[in-house]
Image: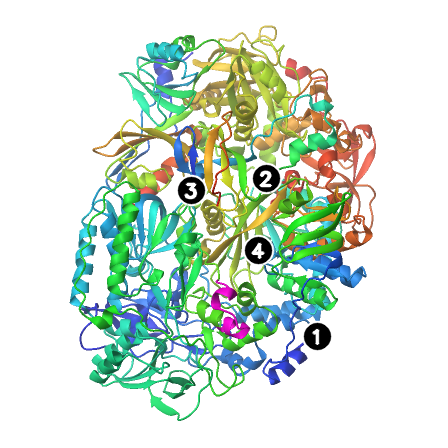
Amino acid sequence: MKAYSLFSLARNAMSYHRNWQRAWRSPDPKKHYDVVIIGGGGHGLATAYYLATQCGISNVAVLEKGWLGGGNTGRNTTIVRSNYLLDASAGMYEHAVKLWEGLSQELNYNVMFSQRGLLHLAHSVHDMQEIGRRGNAIHLNGIDSEFLTPAQVKEMLPIINLDCHYPVMGGLLQRRGGTARHDAVAWGYARGADAAGVDIIQNCEVTGMRIENNQVVGVDTSRGFIGAGKVGSVAAGHSSVIAEMAGFKLPIECYPLQALVSEPVKPIIDCVVMSNGIHVYVSQSDKGELVVGAGSDAYNSYSQRGSYDFIEHTVGPLCELFPLFSRLRMLRQWAGIVDVTVDRSPILSKTSVKNLFFNCGWGTGGFKATPGSGHAFAHSIAAGEMNAIAAPFSIDRFNTGALIDEGAAAAVAH
Amino acid sequence: MADQATLRAGMATPLSGQSYSSNGITISEQQSCDKLIVRADFSDAATVAALSQVLGQTPALEANTYSMADDKAVYWLGPDERLVYLHAQTAADTIGSVQAAIPAGKGAVVDVSDYYTVIQLSGQNARDVLSSGTPFDVHPRVFGAGQCAQTRYGSATVLLSALDDDTPTFNVQVRWSFAQYLWTYLARVAGYC
Amino acid sequence: MFIITCPYCGDRDQTEFTCHGEAHIARPLNTESLSDEEWGDYVFFRQNPKGMHRERWVHAHGCRRWFNALRNTVSDEIFATYKVGDARPPLPENPS
Amino acid sequence: MSQSCRLDSGGRIDRSKVLQFTFDGKSYTGFKGDTLASALLANGVKLLGRSFKYHRPRGLIAAGSEEPNALMQLENGAYTEPNTRATCIELYDGLVANSQNRWPSLGFDVGAINSSVARFLPAGFYYKTFMWPASMWMTYEKFIRKAAGLGVSPTEPDPDVYHSRYATCDVLVIGGGPAGLAAATAAAGSDARVMLIDEQSEFGGSTLGAAAVPEVASWVAASTAALAANNNVTLLPRTTVTGYFDYNYLTAVEKVTDHLGPGNGGTAPRQRFWKIRASRVVIAAGSIERPLVFADNDRPGIMLANAVSTYINRFGVLPDQNIVVFTNNDSAYRTAVDAARSGATVTMVDTRAEVSAELTRVLQQHKVKQFTGHAISSVQGTKGVKAVRIMPLSADGKSLQGQAWEINCGIVANSGGWTPSVHMFSQSGGKLQYDNSIEGFVPDPAKAKRINPGFSVGACNGSFATGDCIAEGAQAGRQAVEACGFVASDVAMPELTDALNDTGMGGIAALWLVPTVHPVGEGPAKHFHDFQNDVTAADIHLAAREGYLSVEHLKRYTTTGMATDQGKTSNLNALAIMAEIRGAQIPEVGTTTFRPPFTPLTFGAIGGQESKDLFLQERHTPMHQCHVQNNAVFEDVGDWKRPWYFPHSGEDMHAAVQRETLSVRTDVGMLDASTLGKIDIQGADAAEFLEMIYTNNWKKLAIGNCRYGLMLNEHGMIFDDGVTTRLGEHHYHMTTTSGGAARVLNWLEEWLQTEWPEKQVYCTSVTEQWAVVALNGPKARDLLATLSDIDLSKEAFPFMSMREGQVAGIPARVYRISFTGELAYEINVPARFGRQLWETLQEAGKPFNLCHYGTEAMHVLRAEKGFIIVGQDTDGTVTPADMDMDWIVSKTKPDFLGKRSFLRSDTARDDRQQLVGLLTTDPTVVLMEGAHIVQEIKDAPPMTTIGRVTSSYMSPNLERSFALGMLKNGLARKGETVQLSLMNGDAVEALVTDPVFIDKEGVRVRG
């Protein structure tokens, strides 16, 4: 892999950029891999990258039915944070944030991780109690966490309407939270994994799972059978489909999740703002677009379309909290498919089929976890056992009752 | 102890004293009347016959319609649910006889007189005002006098009923607690239509 | 934005309804005789098919009746709605 | 030089109405009927903005909503609006526009330095750099952010109002050109409801910008007039269909008063948002001309050919006396003729070697010099075109060779063909197919989405000739309306005699990238396909080289098609260039998915109506006005406005709450408890049903008695609680939490309807039927006795029972239940009497020192008694055992909802967090709600938490602070001291106690 740098950019400019090499190869699949990863999104690519670079397993394929990063990696609102209430979640997401903090350098690919601060607003006594509890929990987990008064919120966000209907009573700030360039994460991991020997195979759809003696031995794909020592499914949005191939159900349902962006304007909002109370999630991309998250519909769907009232119910609060945004314009809206578990926490787990591992159920919170999820999953696959960070997210919890119910605990969307 | 006159004088409705008339649209809160929810098996002929006797009419049997006799109106709310407007009697005086028309333990009669209030909307642009808050199609071809529909207006659940096709007139029934919200909504959009 | 045919009220806008997930999941009797896995399966595990799905909806802003729908989760086409207790309509011959 | 480019006559402008406007501070005039674009062009202003990345000077390209360059900062102050297309702004008097993305001025822009270092800024350059040192990224990012963005956001609240509404129709026609007018005409006539929507201020579509053909013009006028006269037809000009969603749900935005200028709309809304449900949709959205991609094709003055025609024909503006027309198809010949007729010197440069003799004859007739088989090799002029060089094109179109000619000109009118506007069809879920004869994607009717029935007609379907458009439109209108069960009308066809105006596009010979003498990306010139995002052919080559081959990677890596025009003029060119590089057919590279909206639409239009007091519904109790008069401070509890506390003059919240809390324990207080959810439950199986819903036993509850119940979900976790009273043999009155009322009713109905439909149980919400006043305190009985005929003695009316009678002359149900631990009565009266009851009690209570108290005092009072609030002390992960409420869980019932979950290993653990009381060693310290109990205090986090504070108050009754909390294994730890670590680093010590702090024996409540 030829390194990217200011120098390489200048050198290539002199040769009219004729000599850049491919960011990743486009190999034909081999007959057998030590590990096959299903799903070429951020989590799958990160898993492959860490398998190859840290676990000594480079005979790895990533199978992607479409184009890399074409699932939720390329459809989310790019928010990164680790201000979670429960220890298991905090452990996972803080692990991710720490990896995010050096990711551009590690991958030699600028993922534009921008720690501009992430502010949760509270609009009621109940909200205040919620951020009170969460802020303290985060703090005690050694993660940065600050409470803001309405005046401090105003100072940070001069354009906010504190006296909106359901007025702002306070805020919880994580300064290390922020955003990242979503596509770059997939591409950076793909380039890194490829350089470490991973075969990334696009337009290769998994159509079946070969299981012998309750042990997975490979997958059938649109490009033929591919043998595998171990298989990791990281197919957010389609995990239930993969599980069905392996003969079991998951505690997961797929919902449409919508988002939208405005036309680009000069910088107007310098942190990520999240309001669970009135349902606003907004940040401004480096390009200048306001990136706004809408809610997820509550019906199962693989259609990548949501219901329009969700857009209205996102834009209304946005204009209420920032009345001047009313004159800006929506440029684009889209939907992704999120797979959601009952406790809104992910599943990283062994399964009833030997050597078949699942990483799924991230709901609306997957992007921010990308490096942590990939790292934990890679080490767990390599060891054949879930590591300490992944262990609480075992699928067994739905039988034992040890849910990681961040949502129920705090009524927080994430 | 207060006497009946003092009692009546102290009665209030959620929109007491508010009125709107502009842009060819009149919005007014209707004088309150007592109301009953009746839950029963309306596919049972005997029950329907007994209820018809008490209510002075065959209660609306078809979805999205209401029936009306001199002093009562019956709105279809669901397959086993009707809403009775008592224009002349009180719920207290009526509830027993309605209950008696339903086989014991196989239905319910509930006094909901104050649960709802009714806002009347009238004028040439009334349909535009309605369409500013509900996706329900109120065109006369599909929603004429005698028809009613439960739907939503803004974020409130409402019962719409069409009264008059000549001068478009509609009743919008809404829960007491949502009445001010709905009123504000109707009056706001009436200015835009 | 679906148009949903309430089996009682007729065609209405999707925003009058809410969805309550997979239909035809019967609550087990004698729950205490179930294993943790069987109980967990009933409470948490769902088919979540990519394709035809039988699901429950309630006409929340209308007659407040629950009913079932047969919908393709890929095209979002609703092939049938039917009352609780009614026979399940057959799968369509041409689902997409 | 006022309006130096305005022709003496012609156009659809009203020359009698002169309008003043300013651009970049300079004053100009235009006419009514102008757009800002046409008025600027009339004044000879061609430099209108700077590009996003390289800050290259830019001018107009188009005349419609596809314009990528001429983005304006419209108006100032609160009315300012960034990124507004000059081509879409109807001119009004006093309009103020400024150019964007330049500093200090449009003519001299420092950012233009990017253009000279452009070589170092290829697609995706930022992924490859700005990584060192890592700590500097946030600084780099600040500069990147400042440089990016286009216009500036307003910084004041929007003064305008917006209207949104629904509409239902049989046939919706998108686009009011010939095809759309014909479709609407065919569909209208019988009783069908027809809507016809067009972006422009008048109907006629492409004919408005074409040279006048009297037959067509009169057909348009007559059709429009007939539609306008039809009551079943809704005509919406100045309206853009922005989105096409499932089941033929379409959104559109109507500019109601934008064209009048800010503040001139009176009381009318600025824009109206339409949400339309149509049985059938006819898409007649037309097509968009695409530019040829040639060297420096972004210079101001290089425009689309049809835009030049439109400025001439519709606005009477001839942008320059010297015009070069550059084309690969027949349609641009109309522009050459339009310009020549208007007096310009015109040169035609056609990339095709062979052109029909008829076209050549027409050019000769208008004295237009024609070069065939030639192409523009370079453009002179930076801030405006001065001349072009043309050279012969090789037969394969890959190179330029031979004699070069230089032609002086101020305008290059170019046409690379026409792209059907398939956005709407694509948004509807339909798939596209590539039509080689027009070199563009058209709808594949076989792959339309079944739930979105409709038709694509006219240019958006690849039919460009006026006659074809009208015929297709009429047929689709007919089919659409017949599908809805109506009879179609006949559509008269105009006599079309002017062949040139009716040939459509004609023989295109695709030339996706016009070569220069240098390989792509290696010469001094740039070949733009995406003007606004500054994406060039070289960027596509780079993306291909680096493996970003799929169309989505191409878009995301180069940002092509991602600008505010969403690639309307660029998408196909980008695909085609990639296809050439890959040696693939265009459809193999793919097509991009068109996502809503079609053009950017104002957030205010989408969400503005339900703002301020209509933003999230607000619910009031019958006593709301009383509370307002009593100076209540309100709290938002769910949708409800509830009195939080009632400050007397000079009191702050703390003082008011302390007074109210004390007053209830010493005298008597009253609380508006009307928000509690109330459900009437009747039916033969009601008791059996309650047995399943609640954890405790209900069968033996006597009529007239009340019982507290906990509801669990199937996970075994508490989700609501409340008191239910047996009113009759088969009749119960259930109360729920205020916020949980709807959820609980749904829960009950869901079980009844889907699991136990055979059970005879009927639930009816009666929340608003009853106004509820909770009278609490030792003097409650004495006060109530002055107003009620009910025997209030504790023998006749014991705790946890209900009696009916009169209170203040009002028929009432009085429940002797208590949420404070005091002697208490909850008086329920029909809502109409709520206010009367409140006021009567207020008067009658004076001798008893009656106080009003709000939710905060209520919280303190209940916490003193250890009563939990579901949602505050519980959180959805808490079982009854965790709350030390095993006493309410039946050991004898075979089943109830959630019961089985208790057996699971994690739920059955005995070291779960459990409810305890907490008393800080320092009685003045009020713990923060949410503060955590830690296993062991350390100098700094991380620390292991073993519990938390859920409720915490200063109690005037205890004369100290106290708290409730959850503590790991808490039930076994009473009497121990625990440590809490606060955010500020302080450690606080607290004693673990029983959660009941007052009257543990429950004497008062039974008194």
For this rendering, which residue is in front, D805 or A298?
A298
Comparing labels 3 and 2, the label whose residue is closer to the camera: 3
Give the x, y percent position of residue D390.
38, 88
**Mark 4 secondary-structure assignment:** loop
The residue that label 4 is drawn on is A77
Label 3: few (<14), some (14–19) or many (≥20) C-alpha neighbours in 10 Å: some
The residue that label 2 is drawn on is A125
Gap in Å between the C-alphas at discs 3 and 2?
A: 22 Å
Quadrant including the C terminus of chain D: top right
Mark 1 or mark 2, which has the lower sequence index? 1
**Residue drawn where x is 39% and y is 10% of the image:** B46
The residue that label 1 is drawn on is A3
Task: For mark 3, name the chain.
Answer: D
With D181 as the anchor, is D897 left or right in this view? right
**Mark 1 secondary-structure assignment:** loop
Q: How many numbered discs, if any?
A: 4
Do labels 3 and 2 touch, CB within 8 Å? no
Badge 1 amino acid: Ala
The residue that label 3 is drawn on is D614
**Residue drawn where x is 31% and y is 69% of the image:** D36
With A176 as the anchor, is D289 left or right in this view? left
Badge 2 amino acid: Val
**Mark 2 secondary-structure assignment:** helix
Give the x, y percent position of residue A184.
62, 64
